[in-house]
Amino acid sequence: MKLAGRVLLVTGASKGIGAAIAVEAAREGADVVVNYHFDEPGARAVVENICSLGRRAVAVRADVGSRLDVEAMVERGTREIGVIDLLVNNAGIALWKPFLELDEENWDRTLDTNLKSVFLCSQAVARSLVASRKKGSIVNISSIAAHGALDCLVPYCASKGGMTLVTQAMATELAPHGIRVNALAPGTVDIKRNRDTDPDYPGNWETRIPCGRVGRPEEIARPVVFLLSDEAAYVTGQTLWADGGLTSYVPMPRADFARE
């Protein structure tokens, strides 16, 4: 098992990609602190799934944009499961609003949840690791929005673009302490949030993706586990794109390349 004997904290883990990462890590031997903000039933279902795999898990409510909540979450996870040596900063929101209609509350809420949380959670976990003289690994869940603009999502794009350099800067400073920091940038993934926004989400995207389809949550979870594990021991400061080739493709007029 890739993560045997490790303790992982996943933020925003009550559903979607975060839930898939938590469960996949448990399959690979990790005990898991499952963070949620509003969806307690979802978080408890993830905990039950993890426990059914023979691993330990606890659901912890926290607003990851609040230092007090984050510090309490890390303290409780450490007390109930053990020193957290793996962290996935997955919590994120996307609030669609045209730029000219954008308000300060939207900007602050998005940046707090998507980017400030990376600083707060990573610092709390890293301080604990340094104090306990343990090595660790952090993975930040980015997005294709770190590569280019998405319509009506200026704060979201800003948060994910900022994550790229935050990842590199943290990796540089934490390397002497044996803590690696990387990012995983998903492309289009078939999760409930996306289907709620667009009922034909997979169909509307598939012709734009060289692999010809949207991704599944488990296809994001598996490379995250790789980055967390010692198999990636010499990998830090990197962003890995799990997007079916989307960010590598420049669409051309009348170039439907055999996907009719």
Image (cartoon, rainbow, N blue to C red):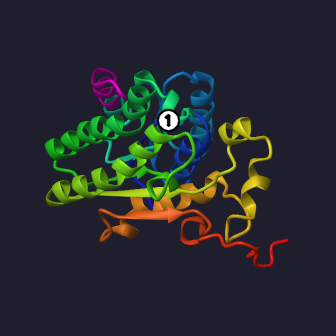
Q: In which quarter of the image is residue 94?
A: top right
Q: Do we see residue 157 in this rendering?
A: yes
Residue 66: say if magenta.
yes
Return the residue nearer the eye: 49 or 250.
Answer: 250
Q: Is residue 86 left or right of residue 134?
A: right
Magenta stretch, main secondary structure class:
helix
In depth, the one of 177 and 148 nearer the eye is 148
Quadrant in which residue 76 is drawn: top left
Does 92 sit above or below residue 169?
above
Does residue 260 appear left or right of residue 150 in this picture? right
Name the residue: 47% across, 37% down: 91
Q: Which residue sits at x=67%, y=55%?
A: 216
Q: Bounds of the magenta span?
A: 63-75
Give coordinates of residue 58: x percent, y percent. Answer: 47, 31
Query: Residue 135, position in %: x, y?
Result: 24, 55
The relative height of residue 75 versus residue 257 in the rendered view (above or below) is above
Residue 150 falls left or right of residue 66: right
Count of numbered labels shown in the rendering = 1
Residue linked to disc 1: 99
In the picture shown, does residue 90 fall above or below 97? below
Inspect this view and state whether residue 143 appears: no
User: Which residue is depicted at the point 37% across and 68% down?
Assistant: 232
Q: Quick check: 69 above or below 29?
A: above
